[in-house]
């Protein structure tokens, strides 16, 4: 089961995020998906994830996530990632484009249920990102 769950998470990063295949999100992410923490002003569930994903790839059109490590146990998959992109669009509804390239790290923990991503816990180095963009 762990290898199948890792394959789902790998597709999440490779095809949905890096490949921008938002239609695949409907097949890999549960309709009642819960993101921890919930993004501000986002709808709940899959719709909220899609809103957030579109905002991020609009802010960073060349955004690319590299999975550095992936570990699975039971229904959980943990991934340590590096994110890179150039800030060319509005970020979080308030950070105007800077044109600066940035690189930040993070950790995601996914819970898989019924062959779909049911929950995700995310930690990103947003302070480091904002420092690179010159916001802080």
Image (cartoon, rainbow, N blue to C red):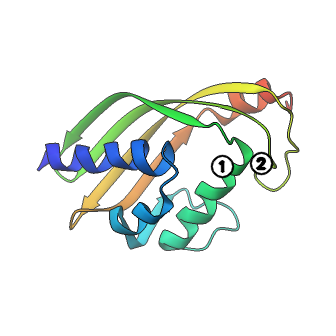
Question: Circle 1: is it few (<14), some (14-19), or many (20+) Cα within 10 Å?
Answer: some
Quadrant housing residue 98: top right
- Tell me, for residue 91, which label it has, or none: 2
Question: Circle 2: is it few (<14), some (14-19), or many (20+) Cα within 10 Å?
Answer: some
* Residue drawn at the location 32% of the way across and 42% of the way down: 10
Q: Position of residue 3 (x, y in %)?
A: 15, 43
Q: CA distance from mark 2 to mark 1?
A: 7 Å
Q: Secondary structure at mark 1?
A: helix
Q: Position of residue 87 (x, y in %)?
A: 76, 36
Above/below status of 56 relative to 125: below
Query: Would you name the residue on which mark 1 appears?
Result: 56
Q: Reading the chain from its start, which is encountered first: label 2 or label 1?
A: 1
Quadrant housing residue 44: bottom right
Classify the position of the C terminus by image quarter.
top right
Whether residue 124 sits left or right of residue 85 in the image: it is left
Residue toward you, 32 or 38 = 32
* Residue drawn at the location 68% of the way across and 62% of the way down: 40
Q: Position of residue 42 (x, y in %)?
A: 64, 68
State the count of labels: 2
* Residue drawn at the location 54% of the way across and 72% of the way down: 47
The answer to whether the residue labelled 2 contacts the one labelled 1, judged by CB atoms less than 8 Å apart, is yes
Whether residue 111 sits left or right of residue 74 in the image: it is right
Seen as rendered, the residue at the extreme left is 1
Whether residue 113 sits left or right of residue 99 in the image: it is left
Whether residue 136 sits left or right of residue 69 in the image: it is right
Residue toward you, 84 or 121 = 84
């Amino acid at each position: 089961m762990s290898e199948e769950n890792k394959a789902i998470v790998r597709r999440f990063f490779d095809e949905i995020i890096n490949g921008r295949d938002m239609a695949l999100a409907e097949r890999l992410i549960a309709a009642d998906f819960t993101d921890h923490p919930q993004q501000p002003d986002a709808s709940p569930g899959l719709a909220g994830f899609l809103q957030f994903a579109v905002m991020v790839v609009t802010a960073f059109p060349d955004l690319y996530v590299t999975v550095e490590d992936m570990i699975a146990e039971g229904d959980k998959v943990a991934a340590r990632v590096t994110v890179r992109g150039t800030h060319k669009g509005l970020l979080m509804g308030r950070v105007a484009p800077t044109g600066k390239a940035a690189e930040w790290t993070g950790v995601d923990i996914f819970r898989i249920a019924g062959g779909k991503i049911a929950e995700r816990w995310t930690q990103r180095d947003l302070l480091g990102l904002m420092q690179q963009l010159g916001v802080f």
